[in-house]
């Protein structure tokens, strides 16, 4: 039945391209005809269709396609957007803020002014101010634009606000009007407008501000990028007090309100727009401690309910709406996590893959594509980096609290996920994903509310007591269609044998739980559609017993496997995984065999991480083996003194990391044969090894081996816990002095 609804959408897409935007009416009609029952079973599918239609309609508006909608349709449509709120940009408030209301922009303001009025600058300069929505970019730019220095320096200037559905000719007309004061003919073409503008500006110093141009830096040569940072705690407090207490306490917070006020300010996390909106709201409230404490406890609902805070949502929605379709689900996925929760980047991207959010791209693994997704969200300032690994790689990330509230609001609208985080939470059974935050909710009550459901994904974030009833047994019995079961860090003692009946399971994580024994009744080999398996030992001495899995019938679709803990031997069934793409063996301590030699038979392996998996004096890579391997991490081979790579071996390898190998005195010559290698990293190598890698003019004996590699990094260990980077790019480093030094903690980077 659901397929027929989708077919109707596709049919109506044809009429959309012809100029008729009637999709919502058509879908509703088709669903009525087909009598889709019971409706709760397809609620999420309907929401997906509505989301797609909404995005198509937004695209029509954004890119200027002509549509014809009858008066009847307009009057009966389901859209809640009115003409008033469609065109009123909440950022306009930033253009009318007095100097006494602005804090924290003095330094960047004068830096930008000095760049603009630089007498030595004779050519056109392009300066970009970047930062997440609501951080104060428009406010800063307007103060610079209106400054006496800029007004005196330039002959003419213009401020152009760019709408999402802008047309080039309209921008040109606005520029000409503001710069020259002259109007242009309504039907004047782009070429004529460009010539007119060029002629007017040819002999004049001019300053033009384009506000809200999200893709400008990517498409234009920029001379300087100024990234606006969040306010410091001191500046955030100053701004809050100015907005909240300026009328009745002369800008000072009453002593009895300081504690709760600081808590409110911290929740805004330096975002000026959030501080101003919340401060303005609180300025209208009574200054009683009980009312303020109540407000702090209900800030989440205030974000949705209070018109003064709606502007935050609108501005953040600009950033969301600008996302490509494939990033929107990834961004909203942050809503499954508790407030202030930092998630490991590797865990996040693995979940995206299991959920089907990551699209295949030629020549790239799904992990590479997912990492690119995360990188773009970070660059767009929608996601914050909480912690980095070596060489700036993301270890953990999170979203701003205010951003999270917007995500939760949208997730509720789209039925993306139900969050159970309050004391009296209960499951309503109308969503495909369930996230349980046991720190807040009563799990026994949640268990009572759970019935049979078409739910697909369950996440358990637990900081409280274990439920009295067998959680996983109920989950497995009621959610037969489950694809994702993420129990990482949960205080679970055992896996219920019912989990073995989840035949559609793609992702199962019991990492950092108390589970010591996996029941044989679970029979991982029975999970025919399992795509990812992540098992970590609860202690360093625990031995992972995985030999019971039959080598004759392992999970045939398993693509990603991570085993963290001691192994007596490499399980035979691993070598039968024809579709395995990623394998991580962490702390295996293997001594009875050479797993590297055995693993070379895996035909689909793209990424291999051996982290304290075993130790060997010599590693041997044969020609014709590891034909698809692109990334190889060899960590903890402390006895390694020789590494042989035959010509023709590892033909597609792009990324090689060795850390640390104190007995390896010279660079393996076989690296020269790795012509596709793009990044090579050595960590904690002996001094003799480092000397042999020195580049020109004092060229080391082994420099020729790595000269063809674009990015070579070398780290030397100092003390017990920190590393200092010596080389950013090997070809350039040895010709200059050490100017930038990077230090990192020697943490267990495998926990990604």
Image: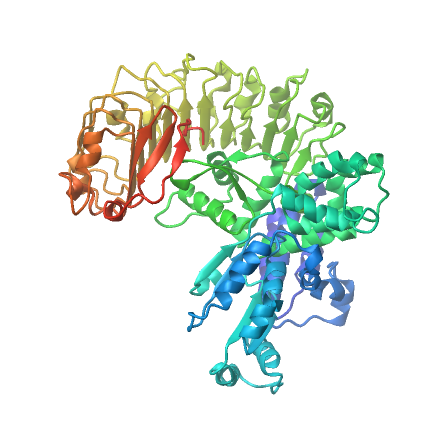
Q: Residue 607: x percent and y percent?
A: 34, 36
Pick the residue in front: 673 or 506. 673
Give above or below for 690 relative to 164. Answer: above
Question: Which of the two residues, 305 or 112, is positioned nearer the viewer here?
Answer: 112
Residue 162 in view? no
Q: Is residue 207 above or below residue 13?
A: below
The quadrant in which residue 659 appears is: top left
Which residue is at 78% across, 63% downward?
76
Residue 367, quarter of the rendered image: top left
Q: Position of residue 32 (x, y in %)?
A: 72, 52
Q: How is the image coloured?
A: rainbow
Q: Residue at x 62, y 40 (%)?
A: 335
Of 40 and 320, the residue lying toward us: 320
Residue lying furthest bottom in this view?
185
- Residue 553 in the image: state x and y as whole percent: 39, 24
On the rendered structure, is 342 left or right of 737? Answer: right
Quadrant for the C terminus in the image? top left
């Amino acid at each position: 039945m659901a397929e027929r609804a989708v077919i109707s959408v596709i049919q109506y897409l044809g009429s959309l391209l012809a100029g008729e935007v009637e999709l919502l009416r058509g879908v509703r009609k088709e669903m009525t005809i087909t009598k889709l029952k019971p409706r709760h079973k397809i609620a999420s599918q309907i929401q997906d269709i509505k989301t797609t239609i909404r995005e198509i309609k937004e695209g029509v508006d954004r890119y200027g396609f002509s549509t014809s909608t009858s008066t009847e349709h307009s009057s009966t449509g389901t859209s809640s957007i009115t003409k008033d709120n469609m065109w009123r940009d909440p950022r306009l408030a930033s253009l009318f803020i007095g100097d006494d209301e602005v804090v924290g922009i003095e330094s960047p303001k004068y830096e930008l002014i000095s760049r603009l009025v630089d007498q030595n600058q004779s050519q056109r300069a392009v300066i970009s101010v970047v930062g997440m929505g609501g951080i104060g970019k428009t406010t800063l730019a307007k103060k610079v634009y209106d400054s006496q220095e800029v007004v005196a320096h330039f002959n003419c200037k213009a401020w152009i606000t760019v709408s999402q559905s802008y047309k080039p000719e309209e921008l040109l007309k606005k520029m000409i009007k503001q710069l020259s004061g002259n109007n242009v003919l309504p039907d004047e073409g782009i070429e004529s407008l460009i010539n007119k503008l060029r002629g007017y500006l040819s002999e004049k110093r001019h300053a033009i501000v384009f506000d809200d141009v999200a893709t400008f830096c990517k498409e234009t040569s920029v001379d300087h990028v100024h990234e606006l940072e969040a306010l410091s705690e001191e500046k955030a407090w100053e701004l809050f007090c100015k907005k909240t207490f300026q009328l009745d306490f002369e800008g000072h917070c009453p002593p009895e309100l300081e504690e709760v006020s600081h808590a409110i300010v911290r929740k805004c996390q330096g975002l000026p727009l959030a501080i101003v909106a919340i401060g303005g709201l609180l300025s209208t409230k009574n200054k009683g401690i009980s009312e303020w404490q109540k407000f702090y406890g209900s800030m989440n609902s205030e974000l949705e309910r209070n018109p003064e805070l709606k502007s935050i949502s609108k501005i953040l929605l600009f950033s969301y709406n600008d996302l490509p379709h494939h990033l929107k689900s990834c961004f909203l996925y942050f809503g499954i996590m508790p407030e202030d929760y930092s998630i490991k980047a590797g865990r996040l991207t693995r979940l995206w893959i299991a959920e089907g959010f990551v699209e295949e791209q030629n020549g790239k693994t799904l992990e590479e594509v997912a990492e690119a997704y995360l990188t773009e969200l970070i660059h767009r300032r929608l996601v914050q980096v909480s912690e980095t690994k070596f060489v700036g790689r993301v270890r953990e990330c999170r979203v701003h609290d205010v951003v999270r509230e917007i995500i939760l609001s949208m997730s509720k609208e789209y039925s993306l996920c139900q969050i159970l985080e309050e004391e009296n939470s209960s499951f309503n059974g109308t969503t495909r994903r369930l996230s349980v935050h046991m720190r807040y909710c009563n799990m026994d009550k949640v268990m009572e509310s759970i019935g049979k459901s078409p739910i697909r994904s369950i996440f358990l974030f637990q900081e409280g007591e274990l439920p009295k009833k067998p959680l996983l047994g109920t989950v497995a019995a009621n959610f037969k269609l489950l694809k994702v079961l993420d129990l990482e860090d949960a205080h679970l003692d055992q896996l219920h044998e019912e989990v073995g009946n989840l035949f559609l399971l793609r992702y199962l994580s019991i990492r950092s739980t108390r589970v010591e024994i996996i029941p044989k009744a679970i029979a991982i080999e029975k999970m025919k559609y399992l795509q990812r398996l992540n098992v970590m030992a609860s202690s360093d001495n625990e031995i992972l017993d995985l030999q019971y899995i039959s080598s004759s019938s392992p999970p045939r679709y398993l693509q990603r496997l991570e085993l963290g803990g001691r192994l007596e031997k490499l399980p035979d069934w691993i070598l039968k995984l024809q579709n395995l793409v990623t394998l991580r063996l962490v702390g295996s301590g293997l001594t009875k065999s050479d797993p590297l030699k055995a693993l070379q038979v895996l035909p689909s392996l793209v990424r291999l991480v051996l982290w304290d998996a075993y130790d060997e004096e010599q590693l041997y890579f044969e020609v014709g083996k590891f034909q698809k391997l692109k990334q190889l991490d060899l960590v903890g081979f402390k006895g390694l003194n020789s590494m042989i790579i035959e010509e023709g071996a590892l033909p597609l390898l792009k990324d090689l990391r060795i850390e640390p190998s104190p007995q390896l005195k010279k660079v393996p010559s076989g690296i020269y044969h790795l012509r596709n290698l793009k990044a090579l990293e050595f960590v904690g190598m002996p001094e003799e090894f480092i000397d042999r890698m020195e580049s020109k003019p004092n060229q080391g004996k082994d420099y020729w081996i790595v000269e063809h590699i674009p990015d070579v990094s070398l780290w030397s260990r100092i003390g017990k816990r920190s590393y200092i980077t010596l080389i950013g790019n090997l070809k350039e480093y040895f010709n200059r002095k050490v100017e930038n030094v990077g230090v990192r903690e020697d943490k267990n980077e495998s926990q990604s």
